[in-house]
């Protein structure tokens, strides 16, 4: 558990601690620094532990999952973050008691793992407006959908689309884009369905290009995002493949599973390892 994660209160976190204490085969660890969750997960793999449960938001889930790729140890999630993208895609309950019971009792499945250069991601990654907002959101003292919506609106007024050179098996062209998302799962989090037809175990990455659009179209695009009808928009282009490359004019600000990162390169290579992660959830 990340004791500083998400929007959950100390009372709720104590509730999780007490619930897990009732199960004699469970041991709870608190993360102390960035990357600690990956180290704990790797140690669990070395010890032959069957399940490692990430208690936290998408950042904690990503850190734990990194340490489990290619192993026989399954990832479970008790979602207490602000977005909970992977948990929502896997239909994990969002209430604490139900989530704990779910991850301790459900059978396992396997999902694909995607990589942005060498960085694993499990839901979405990308560049453009979404990366810009993720970077702004990470600097806020409060979390949650309300704060994210506020930062999105503020950023929308000043953000300018950029040009990217994209390559895959089917495309080789420059696109002017508001944002480009590479999706393994259907959503960013909070049921914002950027790629509603994505399947997390099909061996494919969906690239979603949001083209520049007039200010007046923003509310309609927002509604489509949450209704799962975004692919029907004339401002959306999609492409499915297992390998994409992207090149920009300047070094890239990216996001992966909600985490922003400034790269020291202007090039991306998006790849996939099929069925490389054992998970507890509905694939």
Image (cartoon, rainbow, N blue to C red):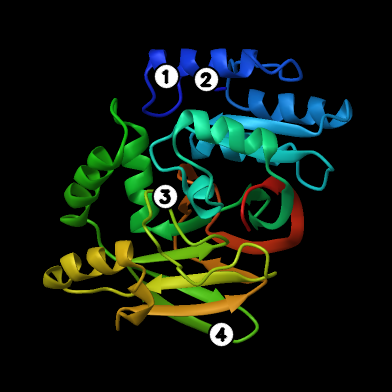
Q: Residues within 10 Å of mark 1 (few under 14, many from 20)?
A: few
Q: Residues within 10 Å of mark 3 (few under 14, many from 20)?
A: many
Gap in angstroms between the C-alphas marked 3 and 4: 28 Å
**In the rendered image, which residue does mark 4 sit on?**
171
Element assignment for label 2: helix
Left or right of 240? Residue 11 is left
Q: Are marks 1 and 2 in contact (CB under 8 Å)?
A: yes
Q: Quadrant of the N terminus?
A: top right
**In the rendered image, which residue does mark 1 sit on?**
12
Gap in angstroms between the C-alphas marked 3 and 1: 21 Å
Left or right of 263? Residue 7 is left
**Residue 222: % across, % down:** 24, 63
Quadrant in the picture for residue 105: top right
**In the rendered image, which residue does mark 2 sit on?**
16
Mark 2 or 4, nearer chain start:
2
Mark 2 vs mark 3: in front: 2
Q: Mark yes or no: residue 3 visible.
A: no
**In the rendered image, which residue does mark 3 sit on?**
189
Mark 2 vs mark 4: in front: 2
Q: Residue at x 81, y 25 (%)?
A: 43
């Amino acid at each position: 558990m990340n004791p500083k994660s998400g929007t959950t209160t100390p009372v709720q976190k104590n509730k999780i601690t007490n619930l897990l204490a009732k199960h004699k085969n469970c041991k709870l660890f608190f993360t102390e620094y960035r990357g600690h969750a990956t180290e704990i997960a790797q140690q669990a793999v070395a010890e032959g532990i069957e399940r490692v449960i990430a208690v936290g938001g998408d950042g904690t889930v990503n850190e734990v999952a990194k340490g489990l790729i290619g192993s026989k140890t399954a990832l479970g999630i008790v979602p207490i973050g602000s977005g909970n993208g992977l948990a929502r895609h896997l239909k994990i309950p969002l209430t604490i008691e139900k989530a704990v019971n779910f991850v301790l009792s459900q059978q396992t499945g396997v999902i694909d793992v995607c990589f942005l250069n060498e960085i694993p991601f499990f839901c979405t990654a990308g560049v453009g407006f979404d990366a810009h907002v993720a970077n702004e959101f990470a600097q806020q003292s409060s979390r949650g959908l309300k704060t994210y919506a506020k930062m999105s609106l503020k950023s929308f007024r000043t953000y300018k689309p950029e040009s990217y050179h994209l390559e895959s098996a089917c495309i080789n062209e420059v696109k002017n884009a508001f944002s480009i998302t590479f999706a393994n799962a259907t959503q960013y989090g909070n049921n914002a369905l950027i790629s509603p037809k994505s399947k997390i175990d099909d061996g494919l990455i969906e690239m979603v290009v949001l083209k520049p659009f007039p200010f007046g179209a923003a509310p309609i695009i927002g509604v489509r995002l949450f209704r799962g009808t975004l692919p029907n928009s004339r401002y959306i282009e999609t492409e499915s493949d297992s390998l994409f490359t992207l090149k920009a004019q300047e070094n890239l600000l990216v996001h992966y599973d909600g985490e922003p990162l400034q790269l020291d390169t202007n090039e991306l290579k998006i790849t996939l390892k099929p069925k490389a992660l054992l998970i507890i959830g509905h694939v």
